[in-house]
Image (cartoon, helix red, strand yellow):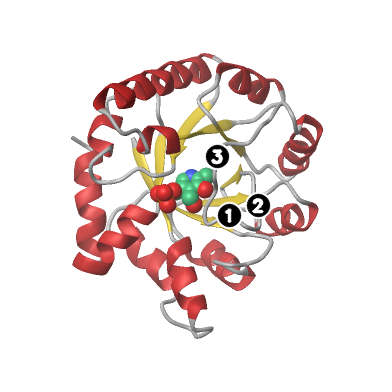
Amino acid sequence: MKFSLNVDHVAFLRNARAEENPDPVTFALMAEQFGIDGIVVHLREDRRHINERDLRLLREQLKTKLDLEMAAVQEIIDIACDVQPDLVTLVPEKREELTTEGGLNVIDNLELIKNAIERLHQENIPVSLFIEPDITQIDVSAEINADFIEIHTGVFANTQTEEEMFDELEIIRQAAKHAKKLGLGVNAGHGLNYQNIKEFIAIKNIDEVSIGQAVIARAVFVGLEKAIKEMIELINK
Ligand code: PXP
């Protein structure tokens, strides 16, 4: 299982003072040195975290993989086509939300998402759809030629009892297996942390996890190198 680090929170901290520090690009380059497999950023319509300068510098300087999370809106699709990330992950986006609140409803937004995939494919950019671990959503994602799905793990992360957690893990396990059978790549993320990753790694068929909050928060206390290496150790167990 690979591990990509989401650095949006670093940009959020920088933007709090409208100054230059901490620079999410420098942070991402350091994270690469410490062994992560890729960097994830969400270019939001309101630019509350990273901005175009960050995105273009990341594209120029990253040696691993750049995964651009974004809404399927024309302005951002145009930027993605120009910047050429290694992967685009389409996510739902609401202005009022603190963070992405759930998976895309691919069925209700079929034409919009299908058109976005087609446009990005014209530029040879692979596309992942951030969805719930739901068999119908997975089937439709495959039908409209998504390359990957990213399974939303927020429900799993928020479970209150062991029983609920194992039920949710089973749902994710079945979803990942089904997606693989259809030839989709399978990523996962949201709310994964140093505790729940220990159970999560038992799931087969997950290519990559995308983690932000837990690792950035830990880095505040112990430094980035230790925070990353601790997570890599748990993932590789
Ligand atoms: N994957 C997606 C699609 C997300 O929107 C987020 C949150 O930005 C993450 C993964 C990472 O979630 P977290 O910050 O809770 O680790």
Could you say which quadrant of the image residue 131 lies in?
Answer: top right
Q: How packed is label 1: few (under 14 Cα within 10 Å), some, or many (20 or more)?
A: few
Distance in Å between CA atoms under marks 3 and 2: 11 Å
Tell me the tag on residue 102: 3
- Quadrant showing the C terminus: top left
The answer to the question of whether label 3 and label 1 lie on touching residues, with beta carbons closer than 8 A, is: no
Distance in Å between CA atoms under marks 2 and 1: 6 Å
Q: How packed is label 2: few (under 14 Cα within 10 Å), some, or many (20 or more)?
A: some
Q: Which residue corresponds to mark 2?
A: 94
Foreground: 2 or 215? 215
Q: Is mark 3 within 8 Å of ligand 1?
A: no
The location of residue 28, given as percent across then percent down, is: 41, 64
Note whether residue 38 is visible.
no
**Which secondary structure lies at badge 1?**
loop
Q: Which amino acid does label 1 sit on?
A: Glu
The answer to the question of whether label 3 and label 2 lie on touching residues, with beta carbons closer than 8 A, is: no
**Which secondary structure lies at badge 3?**
loop
Q: Which amino acid does label 3 sit on?
A: Gly
Tell me the tag on residue 87: none
Foreground: 105 or 4? 105
Q: Earlier in the sequence, mark 3 or mark 2?
A: 2
Q: Which residue corresponds to mark 1?
A: 97
Is residue 134 rendered to the left or right of residue 220? right
Q: Earlier in the sequence, mark 3 or mark 1?
A: 1
Q: Residue at coordinates 50% horizontally, 85% vertically from top-left? A: 19
